[in-house]
Amino acid sequence: MNASTRAISDRLYRNRRIKNAIALGLSGVATLFGLFWLVWILWTTLRTGIGAIGPALFTQMTPPPGSDGGLANALFGSLVMNLGAIAVGTPIGIAAGTYLAEYARKRPIGEAIRFVNDILLSAPSIVLGLFVYTLVVRTSGHFSGYAGALALALIVLPVVVRTTDEMLQLVPSTMREAALSLGVPQWKVTLQVLYRSALPGIVTGVLLALARISGETAPLLFTALNNQYWTHDLSQPMASVPVVIFQYAMSPYDSWHALAWAGAFVVTLFVLLLSLLSRAILLRNKASHD
């Protein structure tokens, strides 16, 4: 290697190091920027609602104006409707994602279904709430927890479909071919080979869907509405934390404002924990494969 070639090589290497340092610096700044807003949101919700955070928040029901209370009925309502949405949306989403990945991967109908699913994935939640309101609430003549769970299930469904489809496509084709060559039926290949390999990704998708619906307010305003009292009857209006936050934040009462901030902190912390859990599942799966 002559001197001119070495000089060119050194200059290219130096330029790459400079560009790499700039990229790393910008990435670090972006990370700190995002973490700043996350810490600021958590601190603001905690500082403002600290007066309402305590055992009463989880044991007492939403109070009338001017009284102290908690969010027990709203927390229960959110838990029931979110679990109902997951119970409805997850099996349907996994089945649809399996069909797209295994039976319609390169077929026109598969591309059409993916296109429609992407539209549903990006649809405003208030539109889905209005759809369920027209389909269920107006037909039955009253608001209900069932309608709220159905509206949330429509938000869960496209997330699970997309995640399942992508995770199954990442499973190597050699695993399918090896199982089929041994005479294993297709349904057993799907259940015992493909699902086992894609399970961490599918579970992550379900957790992310749960995190998304945990703070949804608009669909529940049109479907479950609200209920100041404790109820476990899903055929009646049911309270939820996002709706209570919305109503209490617009009220003129300081005690309601504190409860709204406390509820916002609980929801934010819950979503953060779900995100960390999904990340931990993915990292654990990656480490086991490495």
Image (cartoon, rainbow, N blue to C red):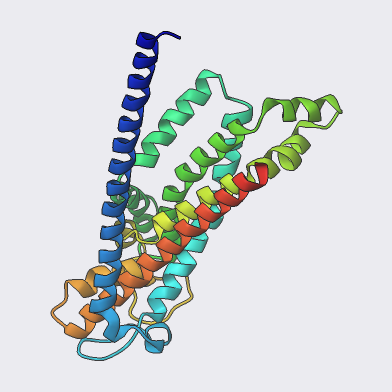
The correct choice, above or below, for 64 with respect to 24 in the image is: below
Residue located at (29% from left, 54% from top):
32
Residue located at (42% from left, 66% from top):
270
Left or right position of 278 against 180: left
Q: Position of residue 216 (x, y in %)?
A: 34, 58
Instruction: Say which quadrant the C terminus sits in.
Output: top right
Q: Is residue 10 visible?
A: yes
The correct choice, above or below, for 257 with respect to 35 in the image is: below
The correct choice, above or below, for 258 with respect to 247 in the image is: below
- The residue closer to the viewer here, 102 or 152, is 102
Left or right position of 95 against 247: right
The correct choice, above or below, for 233 with respect to 84 in the image is: below
- The residue closer to the viewer here, 194 or 113, is 194
Q: Position of residue 70 (x, y in %)?
A: 34, 84
Which quadrant of the figure has residue 72? bottom left
Q: Position of residue 14 (x, y in %)?
A: 33, 26
- The residue closer to the viewer here, 35 or 153, is 35
Q: Where is residue 289 in the image (x, y as percent from the top left)?
A: 66, 42
